[in-house]
Image (cartoon, rainbow, N blue to C red):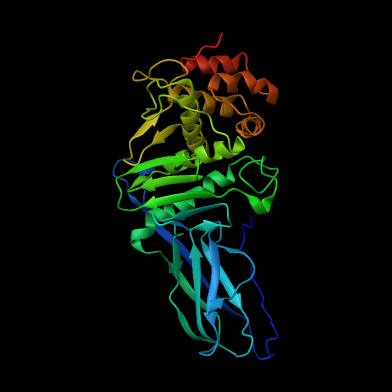
């Protein structure tokens, strides 16, 4: 996927007097940050890697249409966009505007309850004969959580650990046929979050997108689903689960991978919910013991990746791309097939989290 902005040049027989006209600007969004504490202070970020389209028409007799033919994305550093067109028959454009979608290529997107992708349209520019800067713009206030969820998707994509294709998983080798992650956000529903593997859809409701951990946790369920090539473990005792309480081996494995993935991507060692309350993966007095506790498994995964596996989860990602794994015990046993340590320090890490496989 292109990280920089591509600039299309559509000549189409333009007259020598015509010149390229560009609309430029930046798209940012405001959000409440659960990761910053219970008060969830307001912050601002750029919308990164979002699809950009240029729309308009040359004159009243012409058709209103999308003008760019090449893929355009908002800039990964500042949310900037630049979309250009050379008029074909006139020296100016009657109408021009930029449309940004909460979608990145066809890799992930955020939709509303009706399945429609969130979009932002710039103010329509009229009688445009020269390039214009639109400055810093923001989507409607009521849509901000959708854009927060979308932008958070970048973090999982950048850390997905798949160098073999431009898809989520190495099991997908055709870059034009990648499975797309859909995140569906319902603004008025009670806060809730879950992953539907039948539809490759993460459901988010209410203030859930305030927590990047939660968005990444649910997105990591999708990632694990794709790493397993569309297979997913059959979990038990998982309808209600807690970081520090026992559930089952299958539940703790899938939920812990999602917890650890979010923490790994964000570079911390905790889970932060939409209310801003953090819970550490350090085995503490509230924790049950053993590998049926997702916090014990999640902490073990993070410590293995950071302290034994060279600071990266990439070989774990490769292992999950070649084996369908139902439990943490099975994963730990298979680590040796990926040249990952299973003795000594690795066993001590598990014991630190009350897991003992001797």
Q: Residue furthest front?
A: 198
Q: Is residue 44 among the parts visible in the rendering?
A: no
Residue 103 percent location from the top left of the image: 52, 57
Image position of 356 with respect to 48: above or below: above
Q: Is residue 304 among the parts visible in the rendering?
A: yes
- Who's the residue at 69% across and 81% down the image? 11
- Who's the residue at 44% across and 21% down the image? 248
Q: Quadrant of the C terminus?
A: top right
Residue 216 percent location from the top left of the image: 47, 42
Q: Nearer the viewer, residue 293 or 240?
A: 240
Residue 81 position by quadrant:
bottom right
Judged left or right of residue 180, residue 40 is: left
Residue 20 position by quadrant:
bottom right
- Who's the residue at 55% across and 40% down the image? 223
Residue 353 percent location from the top left of the image: 47, 18
Residue 111 position by quadrant:
bottom left
Judged left or right of residue 239, residue 182 is: right
Q: Residue furthest top?
A: 358
Image position of 162 with respect to 349: above or below: below
Q: Quadrant of the N terminus?
A: bottom right
Judged left or right of residue 2, residue 247 is: left
How many numbered tags mark residues here? 0
Residue 320 percent location from the top left of the image: 62, 31
Image position of 149 with respect to 90: above or below: above
């Amino acid at each position: 996927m292109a990280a920089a902005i591509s600039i299309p040049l559509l000549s189409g027989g333009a007259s020598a007097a015509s010149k390229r006209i560009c609309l430029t600007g930046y798209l940012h969004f405001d959000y409440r940050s659960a990761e910053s504490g219970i008060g969830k202070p307001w912050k601002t970020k750029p919308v990164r890697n979002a699809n950009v389209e240029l729309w308009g028409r040359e004159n009243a007799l012409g058709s209103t249409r999308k003008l760019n033919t090449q893929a355009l994305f908002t800039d990964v550093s500042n949310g900037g966009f630049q979309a250009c067109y050379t008029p074909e028959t006139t020296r100016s454009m009657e109408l021009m505007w930029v449309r940004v979608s909460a979608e990145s290529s066809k890799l992930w997107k955020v939709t509303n309850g009706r399945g429609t992708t969130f979009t932002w349209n710039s103010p329509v520019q009229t009688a445009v004969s020269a390039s214009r800067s639109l400055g810093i713009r923001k989507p409607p206030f009521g849509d901000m959580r959708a854009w927060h969820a979308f932008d958070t998707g970048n973090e999982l994509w950048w850390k997905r650990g798949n160098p073999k294709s431009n898809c989520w998983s190495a099991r997908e080798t055709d870059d034009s046929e990648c499975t797309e992650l859909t995140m569906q956000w319902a603004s008025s529903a009670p806060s809730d979050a879950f992953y539907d593997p039948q539809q490759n859809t993460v459901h988010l409701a209410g203030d859930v997108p305030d927590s990047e951990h939660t968005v990444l946790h649910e997105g990591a369920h999708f990632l694990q689903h794709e790493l397993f090539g569309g297979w997913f473990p059959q979990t038990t005792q998982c309808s209600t689960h807690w970081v520090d309480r026992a559930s089952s081996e299958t539940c703790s494995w899938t939920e812990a991978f999602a917890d650890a993935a979010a923490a790994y991507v964000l570079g911390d060692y905790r889970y932060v919910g939409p209310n801003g309350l953090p819970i550490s993966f350090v085995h503490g007095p509230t924790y049950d013991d053993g590998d049926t506790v997702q916090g014990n498994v999640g902490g073990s995964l993070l410590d293995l990746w950071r302290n034994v596996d060279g600071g990266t989860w990439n070989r774990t990602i490769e292992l999950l791309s070649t084996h369908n794994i139902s439990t943490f015990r099975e994963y730990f046993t298979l680590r040796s097939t990926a040249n990952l340590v299973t003795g000594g320090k690795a066993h001590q890490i598990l014991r630190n989290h009350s897991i003992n496989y001797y």
